[in-house]
Image: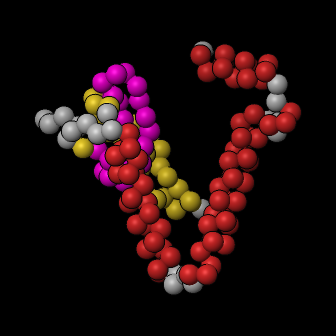
Amino acid sequence: MKKQFIGPKEVLGVAKTEKKITVNEIELGDLIEIQYVDGTKELMSQIMFDAVVKEEATDLTTLRQNRMFPVVNDLLTVMLKWNVKINELEFLFALTTASINDNLNKADKKLWNKTLSDRTMDDVDTVLKEKRQ
């Protein structure tokens, strides 16, 4: 079997997981677990894996390009499908960024059970200790 790489990291193995990517209960794809030769693991969507796995190692800049160019292509396809007006692009990206930030803040608050301004060093220490166990 040929060697596989994701960026500079050599892939040791790929395992299916039970996790699915879903939106509003609609399945969009599978999550797989990538095991690397260096002992690290990573969850990745199957579609992303297919876009980034290569037979030779690449640098991190090339990996980023391999990750993002297909995403940009899909975004442009959606904008074409909706025939978005050029003068609405700035507003579209502002809305998208605001939505992502809102979801990140909600997830962050759910994880920590408090807002960033209410967190203490003890909270950080507690989370780090829980992760070690």
87 sits to left or right of 2: right
Look at the image and name its color scheme: secondary structure
Q: Nearer the viewer, residue 8 or 110?
A: 8
Q: Nearer the viewer, residue 75 or 14?
A: 75
Rendered residue at 34%/46% (across/down): 62
Residue 48's x, y, as percent? 38, 50
Residue 30's x, y, as percent? 41, 50
Q: Quadrant of residue 4?
A: top left
Residue 91 vs 28, above or below: the answer is below
8 magenta-colored? no
Rendered residue at 40%/25% (across/down): 40
Quadrant location of the N terminus in the rendered image: top left
52 magenta-colored? yes
Quadrant location of the C terminus in the rendered image: top right
Q: Over which residues does the magenta segment extend?
A: 34-53
Residue 120's x, y, as percent? 82, 25
Q: Residue furthest left?
A: 1
Rendered residue at 80%/37% (across/down): 116
16 sits to left or right of 99: left
Q: Nearer the viewer, residue 5 or 109?
A: 5
69 sits to left or right of 114: left
Rendered residue at 57%/84% (across/down): 85
Instruction: Kindly tell me whether residue 14 is visible in this rendering.
Output: no
Residue 126's x, y, as percent? 73, 19
The mark total stands at: 0
Q: Residue furthest right?
A: 118
Residue 81 vs 41, above or below: the answer is below
Instruction: Kindly tell me whether residue 87 is visible in this rendering.
Output: yes
Residue 74 vs 110, above or below: the answer is below
33 sits to left or right of 118: left
